[in-house]
Amino acid sequence: MTHAKDLALYHFSHCPFCAYVRREMANLGVDFEIRDAGADAEHRKALKEGGGKVQVPCLLITAEDGSETWLYESMDIVAYLKKRFAKNQVA
């Protein structure tokens, strides 16, 4: 299992799109912090302030220089994760 310290997933526990992203994380053998924006007011606030909206799933990507990218949409998040973590990609 690969742990990515530069990633955090904002999600709601019962959101099917969030479940899809979490399932793909497991399939790729990668884990990172998962923040429940539905149950935790601080996570919801951070999502709103950082990403501009309370929409999940949202992947927070923190670069080495500290800059942040807030990636929304489950399909876009999974595409990013596959591009970065898939070991046997087919071109």
Image (cartoon, rainbow, N blue to C red):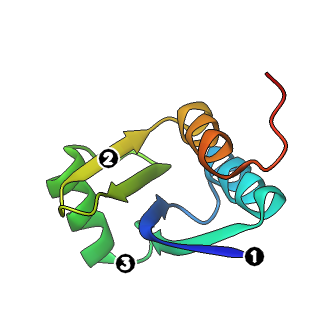
- Alpha carbon separation for disc pair 3 and 1: 26 Å
Give the labeled residue for mark 2. 70
Q: Residue at x 29, y 47 (%)?
A: 69
27 versus 73 height, above or below: below
Element under label 1? loop
Element under label 2? strand
Quarter containing the C terminus: top right
Mark 2 burial class by Cα count in 10 Å: few <14, some 14-19, many 20+: some
Q: Residue at x 77, y 66 (%)?
A: 29
Along the horizontal axis of the image, is 87 left or right of 85?
right
Q: Residue at x 27, y 58 (%)?
A: 47
Check if mark 2's residue and mark 1's residue have beta carbons within 8 Å: no
- Front residue of 54/62: it is 62
For residue 49, the mark is none
Task: Say which amino acid is labelled 3.
Answer: Asp
Give the labeled residue for mark 1. 1
Give the labeled residue for mark 3. 40
Along the horizontal axis of the image, is 69 left or right of 1?
left
| Of the two numbered discs 2 and 1 in the rendering, the one whose residue sits closer to the viewer | 1
Element under label 3? loop
Q: Earlier in the sequence, mark 3 or mark 1?
A: 1
Task: Say which amino acid is labelled 1.
Answer: Met
